[in-house]
Amino acid sequence: MNKKVSSEVLAIMLVAHPSLPVKNVKELIALAKARPGELNLANVDPSSMMAGHLFCMLANVKIEAVPYKGAAPMMIDLSRLTL
């Protein structure tokens, strides 16, 4: 029996608005711990949602999940500082 093995690449991007006072992931985690529930994490599909939950779990932080119906509306809100 011949089985095909498929491999997929999942690209996850972590983006912060320049006005957020962090320069790296370590600083982001420290800020999230200092301000639990005040930061937002956008997701556009189940994969990004799971990645966000995994990040929060591993970093032991509480960040509010904000679901979007696509990357375009999310990027508009990010650029307008409404996310």
Image (spheres, grey):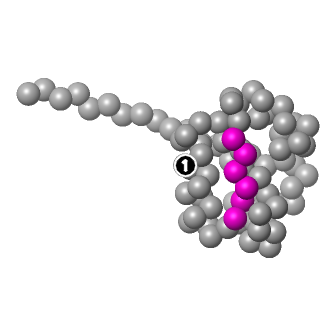
What residue does disc 1 label? 50
Which portion, as a residue range, is magenta?
A: 62-67
Say few, some or many: other residues with alpha carbon within 10 Å of mark 1 (under 14 / 14 to 19 / 20 or more): few
Q: Is residue 30 visible?
A: no
**Main structural element of the magenta stretch: helix, strand or loop?**
strand
User: Residue 72: image x %, image y %?
Assistant: 75, 27
Does residue 76 sit above or below 19 in this rendering?
above
In the image as oriented, which residue stretches furthest toward the left?
1
Q: Which residue is found at the position 82% from the left and 61% from the top?
A: 38
| Element type at mark 1 | helix
Does residue 70 sit above or below 34 in this rendering?
above
The answer to whether residue 65 is magenta is yes
Q: Which residue is found at the position 83% from the left and 39% from the top?
A: 78
In the image as oriented, which residue stretches furthest toward the bottom?
34
Which quarter of the rendered picture does the N terminus lie within? top left
User: Residue 25: image x %, image y %?
Assistant: 69, 60
Q: Is residue 76 visible?
A: yes
Q: Is residue 48 left or right of residue 68?
A: left
Does residue 72 sit above or below 65 in this rendering?
above
- The front one of 23 and 44 is 44
User: Residue 18: image x %, image y %?
Assistant: 87, 49
The answer to whether residue 32 is magenta is no
Mark 1: amino acid: Met
Q: Which residue is found at the position 56% from the left and 65% from the top?
A: 58
Q: Is residue 83 left or right of residue 24?
A: right
Residue 13: quarter of image: top right
